[in-house]
Image (spheres, rainbow, N blue to C red):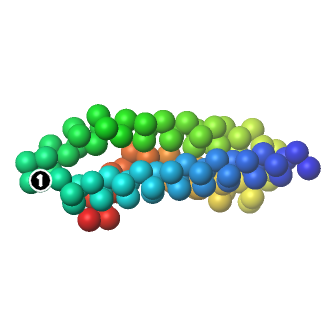
């Protein structure tokens, strides 16, 4: 029973990380549209200074990845969990707000 709960919590943490990343990047894209052209040129610096907490979202994704690693479920059930946690980690460092423009 506990084996399945590790994967459940891994999916929950990875999903939370993905959702938080999408929300933060949506807010970044809205702010990008509202600022003037000069600020748009320096928007990467602005985004890092104002939304630094977006990189803290990777912590639950790493915890989820660790839970997948220590779970005792067979590999067939682990593979989607690996993919979900890796997507969560990668999305934090990609600037997907540029794709929302």
**Percent position (x, y) of residue 71?**
78, 43
Location of the C terminus (image quadrant): bottom left
| Quarter where residue 78 is shown | bottom right
Secondary structure beneath dot 1 equals loop
Residue at position x 21%, y 57% from top? 34
Residue at position x 65%, y 59% from top? 80
**Percent position (x, y) of residue 50?**
31, 38
Q: Is residue 95 placed above or below 46 in the rendered structure?
A: below
Q: What residue does disc 1 label?
A: 36
Q: Is residue 30 placed above or below 2 in the rendered structure?
A: below
* Residue closest to the eye, 77 or 95: 95
| Quarter where residue 31 is shown | bottom left
**Would residue 69 be visible to someone looking at this image?**
no
**Percent position (x, y) of residue 4?**
83, 52
State the residue lying farthest toward the right.
Answer: 1
| Quarter where residue 27 is shown | bottom left
């Amino acid at each position: 029973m506990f084996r399945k709960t590790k994967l459940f919590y891994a999916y929950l943490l990875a999903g939370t990380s993905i959702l938080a990343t999408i929300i933060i990047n949506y807010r970044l894209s809205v702010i990008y549209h509202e600022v003037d052209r000069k600020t748009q040129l320096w928007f990467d610096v602005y985004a890092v200074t104002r939304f630094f907490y977006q990189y803290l979202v990777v912590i639950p994704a790493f915890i989820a990845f660790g839970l997948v690693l220590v779970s005792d479920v067979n590999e067939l059930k682990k593979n989607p969990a690996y993919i979900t946690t890796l997507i969560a980690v990668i999305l934090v460092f990609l600037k997907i707000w540029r794709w929302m423009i």
